[in-house]
Amino acid sequence: MAAPDGELRMSDGEFRMFAELIRGCCGLHFAQETRFLLERRIERRMRETGASSFAAYHLELRSAAGDGGELGALIDEITTNETYFFRERRQLSALVGEILPEALLQRRERGSGPVSVWSAGCASGEEPYSIVILAMEAGLDPGKELRVYASDISRRMLQRARQGTYRESAFRETEPGLRTRYFAEKDGVWRISDDVKKHVDFVHTNLMDRGKVALLPSLDVILCRNVLIYFDAAGKRTVVGTFEEKLRPGGHLLLGHSESLINLSTSLELRHLRQDMVYRKPLGGLRAPDAWHAAAQAALRREGAS
Protein backbone atom coordinates (compact mmCIF):
# COMPACT_ATOMS: atom_id res chain seq x y z
CA MET A 1 0.00 0.00 0.00
CA ALA A 2 1.36 3.44 -0.96
CA ALA A 3 0.99 6.51 1.25
CA PRO A 4 0.27 10.00 -0.18
CA ASP A 5 3.96 10.86 0.07
CA GLY A 6 4.83 7.95 -2.21
CA GLU A 7 6.33 5.78 0.56
CA LEU A 8 5.04 2.25 1.04
CA ARG A 9 3.16 1.35 4.19
CA MET A 10 2.99 -2.11 5.73
CA SER A 11 -0.25 -3.54 6.98
CA ASP A 12 -0.27 -4.95 10.51
CA GLY A 13 -0.16 -8.46 9.07
CA GLU A 14 2.79 -7.65 6.82
CA PHE A 15 4.73 -6.17 9.73
CA ARG A 16 4.17 -9.32 11.78
CA MET A 17 5.28 -11.52 8.86
CA PHE A 18 8.57 -9.65 8.40
CA ALA A 19 9.24 -9.39 12.14
CA GLU A 20 8.73 -13.14 12.56
CA LEU A 21 10.88 -13.97 9.55
CA ILE A 22 13.76 -11.83 10.79
CA ARG A 23 13.49 -13.07 14.36
CA GLY A 24 13.50 -16.68 13.16
CA CYS A 25 16.51 -16.10 10.93
CA CYS A 26 18.83 -14.14 13.19
CA GLY A 27 17.08 -13.37 16.48
CA LEU A 28 16.67 -9.64 15.94
CA HIS A 29 13.45 -8.41 17.50
CA PHE A 30 11.37 -5.59 16.05
CA ALA A 31 8.55 -4.42 18.32
CA GLN A 32 5.78 -2.03 17.37
CA GLU A 33 7.82 1.00 18.43
CA THR A 34 10.48 0.10 15.85
CA ARG A 35 7.97 -0.61 13.09
CA PHE A 36 8.70 2.56 11.12
CA LEU A 37 12.44 1.83 11.16
CA LEU A 38 11.91 -1.68 9.83
CA GLU A 39 9.43 -0.45 7.23
CA ARG A 40 11.83 2.13 5.80
CA ARG A 41 14.78 -0.25 5.66
CA ILE A 42 12.78 -2.96 3.97
CA GLU A 43 11.43 -0.41 1.52
CA ARG A 44 15.00 0.54 0.55
CA ARG A 45 15.76 -3.08 -0.31
CA MET A 46 12.50 -3.41 -2.24
CA ARG A 47 13.40 -0.44 -4.41
CA GLU A 48 16.83 -2.01 -5.06
CA THR A 49 15.32 -5.34 -6.09
CA GLY A 50 12.28 -3.99 -7.90
CA ALA A 51 9.84 -5.89 -5.68
CA SER A 52 6.29 -4.79 -6.43
CA SER A 53 4.82 -5.23 -2.94
CA PHE A 54 5.69 -6.22 0.61
CA ALA A 55 4.03 -9.59 0.00
CA ALA A 56 6.15 -10.24 -3.10
CA TYR A 57 9.35 -9.26 -1.29
CA HIS A 58 8.46 -11.44 1.69
CA LEU A 59 8.01 -14.39 -0.66
CA GLU A 60 11.41 -13.67 -2.22
CA LEU A 61 13.03 -13.72 1.24
CA ARG A 62 11.29 -16.95 2.23
CA SER A 63 12.57 -18.56 -0.96
CA ALA A 64 16.18 -17.56 -0.24
CA ALA A 65 18.53 -20.26 1.02
CA GLY A 66 20.21 -19.49 4.32
CA ASP A 67 21.23 -15.94 5.16
CA GLY A 68 23.03 -15.26 1.92
CA GLY A 69 21.66 -13.54 -1.17
CA GLU A 70 18.81 -11.11 -0.67
CA LEU A 71 18.17 -12.21 2.91
CA GLY A 72 21.77 -11.38 3.73
CA ALA A 73 21.41 -8.01 2.02
CA LEU A 74 18.35 -7.24 4.15
CA ILE A 75 20.23 -8.23 7.30
CA ASP A 76 22.98 -5.80 6.30
CA GLU A 77 20.30 -3.11 5.95
CA ILE A 78 18.52 -3.68 9.26
CA THR A 79 21.42 -4.31 11.65
CA THR A 80 22.69 -1.52 13.91
CA ASN A 81 26.48 -1.10 13.82
CA GLU A 82 27.31 1.80 16.13
CA THR A 83 30.79 1.30 17.58
CA TYR A 84 34.19 2.93 18.01
CA PHE A 85 37.65 2.11 19.33
CA PHE A 86 38.03 1.49 23.08
CA ARG A 87 34.31 1.68 23.76
CA GLU A 88 33.54 1.07 27.46
CA ARG A 89 37.24 1.38 28.20
CA ARG A 90 37.07 0.34 31.87
CA GLN A 91 35.78 -3.06 30.87
CA LEU A 92 38.50 -3.52 28.25
CA SER A 93 41.08 -2.51 30.86
CA ALA A 94 39.67 -5.15 33.22
CA LEU A 95 39.91 -7.69 30.40
CA VAL A 96 43.55 -6.95 29.63
CA GLY A 97 44.71 -6.16 33.16
CA GLU A 98 42.92 -8.88 35.12
CA ILE A 99 41.14 -11.53 33.04
CA LEU A 100 43.78 -12.22 30.38
CA PRO A 101 46.75 -12.60 32.77
CA GLU A 102 44.71 -15.02 34.86
CA ALA A 103 43.62 -17.03 31.81
CA LEU A 104 47.17 -17.02 30.43
CA LEU A 105 48.56 -18.47 33.64
CA GLN A 106 45.88 -21.15 33.62
CA ARG A 107 46.73 -22.04 30.01
CA ARG A 108 50.46 -22.13 30.76
CA GLU A 109 49.97 -24.54 33.64
CA ARG A 110 48.02 -26.81 31.30
CA GLY A 111 50.58 -26.33 28.53
CA SER A 112 47.85 -25.52 26.02
CA GLY A 113 48.30 -22.65 23.61
CA PRO A 114 47.18 -19.02 23.63
CA VAL A 115 44.18 -17.53 25.39
CA SER A 116 41.20 -17.48 23.03
CA VAL A 117 38.87 -14.46 22.89
CA TRP A 118 35.70 -14.09 20.81
CA SER A 119 34.24 -10.69 19.92
CA ALA A 120 30.65 -11.67 19.06
CA GLY A 121 28.94 -8.93 17.08
CA CYS A 122 32.12 -7.11 16.12
CA ALA A 123 30.54 -4.79 13.50
CA SER A 124 33.35 -3.01 11.62
CA GLY A 125 36.11 -4.43 13.81
CA GLU A 126 36.88 -1.71 16.34
CA GLU A 127 36.34 -3.96 19.37
CA PRO A 128 38.64 -6.88 18.43
CA TYR A 129 41.33 -4.52 17.19
CA SER A 130 41.06 -2.56 20.45
CA ILE A 131 41.65 -5.78 22.40
CA VAL A 132 44.80 -6.59 20.43
CA ILE A 133 46.13 -3.03 20.79
CA LEU A 134 45.58 -2.95 24.55
CA ALA A 135 47.12 -6.41 24.91
CA MET A 136 50.22 -5.26 23.03
CA GLU A 137 50.37 -2.12 25.17
CA ALA A 138 50.26 -4.35 28.26
CA GLY A 139 53.22 -6.40 27.04
CA LEU A 140 51.32 -9.48 25.89
CA ASP A 141 52.38 -11.27 22.73
CA PRO A 142 49.32 -11.74 20.45
CA GLY A 143 49.67 -14.84 18.32
CA LYS A 144 51.70 -16.61 20.97
CA GLU A 145 49.71 -15.71 24.09
CA LEU A 146 46.44 -14.46 22.63
CA ARG A 147 44.17 -15.26 19.70
CA VAL A 148 41.15 -13.10 18.89
CA TYR A 149 38.17 -14.30 16.88
CA ALA A 150 35.59 -11.77 15.69
CA SER A 151 32.22 -12.40 14.12
CA ASP A 152 29.20 -10.55 12.84
CA ILE A 153 26.05 -11.43 10.96
CA SER A 154 26.53 -8.53 8.54
CA ARG A 155 28.78 -9.47 5.64
CA ARG A 156 29.12 -5.79 4.73
CA MET A 157 30.45 -4.97 8.20
CA LEU A 158 32.88 -7.88 8.12
CA GLN A 159 34.25 -6.65 4.80
CA ARG A 160 34.90 -3.25 6.38
CA ALA A 161 36.49 -4.90 9.41
CA ARG A 162 38.87 -6.91 7.25
CA GLN A 163 39.84 -3.77 5.36
CA GLY A 164 40.72 -2.08 8.65
CA THR A 165 40.19 1.51 7.47
CA TYR A 166 38.41 4.10 9.63
CA ARG A 167 37.38 7.73 9.69
CA GLU A 168 37.51 10.25 12.50
CA SER A 169 34.29 9.16 14.22
CA ALA A 170 35.86 5.82 15.14
CA PHE A 171 38.45 7.52 17.34
CA ARG A 172 36.29 9.50 19.77
CA GLU A 173 37.86 7.63 22.74
CA THR A 174 41.36 7.06 21.31
CA GLU A 175 44.46 8.75 22.71
CA PRO A 176 46.63 10.41 20.04
CA GLY A 177 49.61 8.25 20.97
CA LEU A 178 47.73 5.01 20.29
CA ARG A 179 46.51 6.29 16.97
CA THR A 180 50.03 7.27 15.96
CA ARG A 181 51.50 3.89 16.95
CA TYR A 182 48.90 1.60 15.44
CA PHE A 183 47.40 3.47 12.47
CA ALA A 184 48.62 5.21 9.33
CA GLU A 185 46.65 8.14 7.86
CA LYS A 186 46.12 8.98 4.20
CA ASP A 187 43.55 11.45 2.83
CA GLY A 188 41.57 11.48 6.06
CA VAL A 189 41.35 7.70 6.30
CA TRP A 190 43.21 5.76 9.00
CA ARG A 191 44.42 2.23 8.23
CA ILE A 192 45.21 -0.12 11.07
CA SER A 193 48.66 -1.67 11.25
CA ASP A 194 49.14 -5.15 9.81
CA ASP A 195 50.86 -6.03 13.10
CA VAL A 196 47.44 -5.67 14.74
CA LYS A 197 45.27 -6.92 11.90
CA LYS A 198 47.02 -10.26 11.57
CA HIS A 199 45.98 -11.29 15.07
CA VAL A 200 42.23 -11.16 14.44
CA ASP A 201 40.33 -13.93 12.62
CA PHE A 202 37.07 -12.60 11.19
CA VAL A 203 34.27 -15.08 10.55
CA HIS A 204 30.68 -14.68 9.39
CA THR A 205 28.47 -16.06 12.16
CA ASN A 206 24.78 -15.93 12.99
CA LEU A 207 24.54 -16.19 16.79
CA MET A 208 21.29 -18.14 16.41
CA ASP A 209 23.01 -20.78 14.27
CA ARG A 210 24.63 -23.22 16.67
CA GLY A 211 26.14 -25.15 13.79
CA LYS A 212 28.22 -22.16 12.71
CA VAL A 213 29.15 -21.23 16.27
CA ALA A 214 30.29 -24.81 16.86
CA LEU A 215 33.11 -24.22 14.36
CA LEU A 216 34.77 -21.85 16.84
CA PRO A 217 37.15 -23.39 19.39
CA SER A 218 36.46 -23.51 23.11
CA LEU A 219 36.94 -20.02 24.48
CA ASP A 220 38.42 -18.30 27.51
CA VAL A 221 36.57 -15.00 26.99
CA ILE A 222 33.49 -13.98 25.03
CA LEU A 223 32.56 -10.34 24.51
CA CYS A 224 29.00 -9.72 23.37
CA ARG A 225 28.49 -6.08 24.20
CA ASN A 226 25.42 -4.08 23.24
CA VAL A 227 24.15 -6.90 21.03
CA LEU A 228 21.61 -8.78 23.15
CA ILE A 229 19.55 -5.60 23.52
CA TYR A 230 18.30 -6.26 19.97
CA PHE A 231 16.96 -9.74 20.83
CA ASP A 232 13.76 -10.77 22.56
CA ALA A 233 13.90 -12.88 25.73
CA ALA A 234 13.80 -16.22 23.89
CA GLY A 235 16.56 -15.14 21.53
CA LYS A 236 18.70 -13.91 24.41
CA ARG A 237 18.35 -17.24 26.20
CA THR A 238 19.36 -19.12 23.06
CA VAL A 239 22.47 -17.00 22.54
CA VAL A 240 23.51 -17.07 26.20
CA GLY A 241 23.08 -20.85 26.22
CA THR A 242 25.44 -21.06 23.25
CA PHE A 243 27.98 -18.89 25.08
CA GLU A 244 27.78 -21.16 28.12
CA GLU A 245 28.59 -24.15 25.93
CA LYS A 246 31.54 -22.45 24.23
CA LEU A 247 33.19 -21.12 27.40
CA ARG A 248 35.81 -23.19 29.15
CA PRO A 249 35.40 -23.67 32.93
CA GLY A 250 36.53 -20.40 34.49
CA GLY A 251 35.89 -18.52 31.22
CA HIS A 252 34.36 -15.06 31.23
CA LEU A 253 31.44 -13.41 29.44
CA LEU A 254 31.51 -9.62 29.04
CA LEU A 255 28.24 -7.86 28.25
CA GLY A 256 27.50 -4.19 27.66
CA HIS A 257 27.05 -2.05 30.76
CA SER A 258 23.30 -1.81 30.13
CA GLU A 259 22.91 -5.61 29.82
CA SER A 260 22.65 -8.41 32.36
CA LEU A 261 21.73 -12.09 32.65
CA ILE A 262 18.84 -11.45 35.04
CA ASN A 263 15.97 -13.79 34.09
CA LEU A 264 18.14 -15.30 31.37
CA SER A 265 20.61 -17.65 33.05
CA THR A 266 21.78 -18.87 36.44
CA SER A 267 24.66 -20.94 35.05
CA LEU A 268 27.11 -18.03 34.93
CA GLU A 269 28.07 -16.21 38.12
CA LEU A 270 28.71 -12.51 38.55
CA ARG A 271 32.31 -11.65 39.33
CA HIS A 272 33.51 -8.36 40.78
CA LEU A 273 36.86 -7.21 39.39
CA ARG A 274 38.76 -4.11 40.41
CA GLN A 275 37.49 -2.11 37.44
CA ASP A 276 34.25 -3.80 36.42
CA MET A 277 31.78 -6.66 36.88
CA VAL A 278 31.68 -9.58 34.47
CA TYR A 279 30.15 -13.05 34.25
CA ARG A 280 32.14 -16.25 34.73
CA LYS A 281 31.54 -19.92 34.08
CA PRO A 282 32.20 -21.80 37.36
CA LEU A 283 35.53 -23.53 37.57
CA GLY A 284 34.31 -26.76 39.10
CA GLY A 285 37.24 -28.59 40.58
CA LEU A 286 39.88 -26.14 39.36
CA ARG A 287 41.70 -23.63 41.52
CA ALA A 288 39.48 -20.83 42.86
CA PRO A 289 39.44 -17.77 40.58
CA ASP A 290 40.71 -15.40 43.28
CA ALA A 291 43.73 -17.65 43.69
CA TRP A 292 44.20 -17.66 39.92
CA HIS A 293 44.15 -13.89 39.91
CA ALA A 294 46.68 -13.57 42.74
CA ALA A 295 48.98 -16.08 41.09
CA ALA A 296 48.67 -14.33 37.74
CA GLN A 297 49.59 -10.96 39.22
CA ALA A 298 52.57 -12.50 41.03
CA ALA A 299 53.76 -14.11 37.82
CA LEU A 300 53.53 -10.81 35.95
CA ARG A 301 55.52 -9.06 38.67
CA ARG A 302 58.23 -11.74 38.47
CA GLU A 303 58.41 -11.41 34.68
CA GLY A 304 58.63 -7.63 34.96
CA ALA A 305 61.51 -7.88 37.41
CA SER A 306 63.49 -10.30 35.28
Image (cartoon, rainbow, N blue to C red):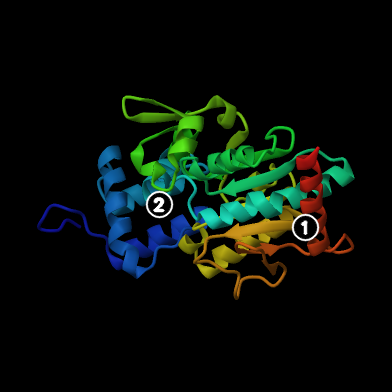
| Residue 224 placement: quadrant | bottom right
Q: Which one is nearer the viewer's eye here, 71 or 291?
A: 291
Please state which of the two labelled residues, at mark 1 or mark 2, is closer to the viewer.
1
Give left or right: position of 272 versus 161: right
| Amino acid bearing label 1 | His
- N-terminal of the pair, mark 1 or mark 2, is 2
Q: Kindly tell me whether residue 277 is visible in this rendering.
A: yes
Q: Kindly tell me whether residue 67 is visible in this rendering.
A: no
The residue at which mark 1 appears reads as: 293
Give the residue displayed 64% in from the left and 44% down from the top.
Answer: 212
The residue at which mark 2 appears reads as: 80
| Amino acid bearing label 2 | Thr
Image coordinates of residue 150 in percent, x first then y, are: 58, 42
Q: Which one is nearer the viewer's eye here, 295 or 26?
A: 295
Disc 1 to disc 2, C-alpha distance: 36 Å
The kind of secondary structure element at disc 1 is helix
Give left or right: position of 109 versus 231: right
Image coordinates of residue 104 in percent, x first then y, are: 77, 46
Tell which residue pokes out farthest to the bottom in this image.
263
**Relative to 197, is 259 above or below?**
below
Which disc number belongs to residue 192? none
Tell which residue pokes out farthest to the left in this image.
4
Give left or right: position of 48 versus 289: left
